[in-house]
Amino acid sequence: MPEIDELIESEIRRPTVFIDESVLYPEYVPKRLPHRETHVRKIAAFFKAFSDSPGRTSVRVVLVGPVGTGKTATAIAFGRAFSRMMQRRGVLLKYVHVNCSKSSNPASIFRDIKNQLGLPLPDRGLSAREMAIGLLRILERENMYVIVTLDEIEYFIKSSSPSGRFLLLRFYDVFKEDVKRLNFIYVTRGSPTGIQAVLDSITGSYLMENVIPFQPYTAAELMDILNDRVKEAFYEGVVDEEVVESIARLTGYDTGGDGNARKAIAILHAAGKLADKELAEGRASRVTVDHVRAVVAQEYQSLIDVLDKIYHLELHEILVLKAIILALYRTGESFIPMGEIERTYREICEELGEEPRRHTRVYMLVMDLKRRGIIITKTSMKGRRGRSTYVGFAAAPLDKLLEKLNRVIEEKRLIR
Ligand code: ADP
Ligand code: MG
């Protein structure tokens, strides 16, 4: 057995293609946002009202577009830069970013805001309204202003009550303050025309004029985005020139992809990881198009495998599989308990108007999926109540599989 020191030493000295892999993580906010200059400019135009006269109005803008078009990155980049700029001018402006898929009711959103601001406001036992009042009082005392981004706001709108929506989205209709200390950037997935429900909740048709649409990226735009990341993440000259081009072509909106920068960066990251592994084994020295191909093929091959296995299954077994994938996707966990699967399965059945199978039957269907090698299970001891089953799924990206599953389910229901 090597000594611990040696283990650590050899890992640290291991040759690698990466200077800084964290640049490729989805939450990394780059210094530059190529092809989003006009978007930043438009947001800035709305916030001119703030810089002219802080507190006179509450600025509100809506960012709309498909996944991976840079909405989150742009909101954060703008918010940080603009508040820094205002602070230099002696206005205490802070930026707060709330993801509504994590904090989805008004109380937890206000809690998130005050925690990010580091404000000494107790939250136990307070209603959302009371927390908002407490928050306003402290902002007043500190003479502080805030930009709050409510990201993935569709989650909040779907899961909140009308009064909760009113409280959060019509904030200054509820709290008639003279000095408006909160400004809002609302971010939502979808198309500018498809967001009427969102706008109706935030209301005022006047907000329609404050909508800034984000378009899917073209291959040429993705090349610029990827090239920036290559420079920061990898050692110079380690990534073949064609790598960026091939990823951009795979993902570009004008070349048959969905124009999703997150996906493009994820492929670059995965190809880099693969090359890195081969480097350690002495089998590669650079990141090549072959690594890109291998990564993309892996992703699609596992997808094809799963679909191949499920086509002949009965409808309810596929619905149970969808419940598993959906529950894993929503929670972000790698394993989920049986109870959660059953709940999700019932929800899916209700949506489709299908009579759900009974508990024991659902369990048998899960076990059958396991027997076919489509899912994996593990059991854990759960106190005195004995063993309980957890289900996971290793192959294929979940979002893509969900899309395909929906199509299979539609076909199955048609031909029955
Ligand atoms: P959205 O919120 O629209 O789903 P994100 O802002 O999360 O998209 O962007 C997805 C990924 O792509 C993030 O890693 C982000 O940093 C990166 N990204 C998106 N647009 C750009 C851009 N114009 N320049 C650099 N990186 C970008
Ligand atoms: Mg986002």
Image (cartoon, rainbow, N blue to C red):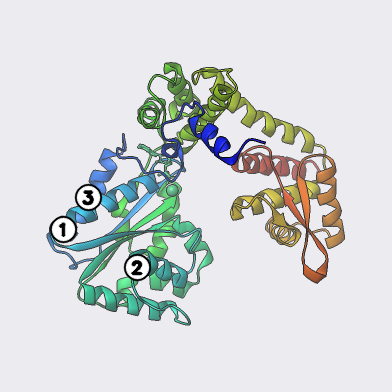
| Cα gap from disc 3 to disc 1, whole angstroms | 10 Å
| Label 2 crowd (10 A; few <14 / some 14-19 / many >=20) | few
Q: Position of residue 393 (x, y in %)?
A: 70, 44
The numbered mark, 3 or 1, whose residue comes first in the sequence reads: 3
Callout 3 touching callout 1 (CB < 8 Å): no
| Label 3 crowd (10 A; few <14 / some 14-19 / many >=20) | some
In the visual, does 270 lie left or right of 79? right
| Cα gap from disc 3 to disc 2, whole angstroms | 26 Å
- Seen from the viewer's position, the closer of residues 317 and 302 is 302
Mark number, residue 51:
1
Q: Position of residue 335 (x, y in %)?
A: 69, 52
Name the amino acid, label 1: Ser
Q: Is residue 249 above or below residue 392?
A: above
Name the amino acid, label 2: Gly
SS at circle 3: helix
The numbered mark, 3 or 2, whose residue comes first in the sequence reads: 3
SS at circle 1: helix
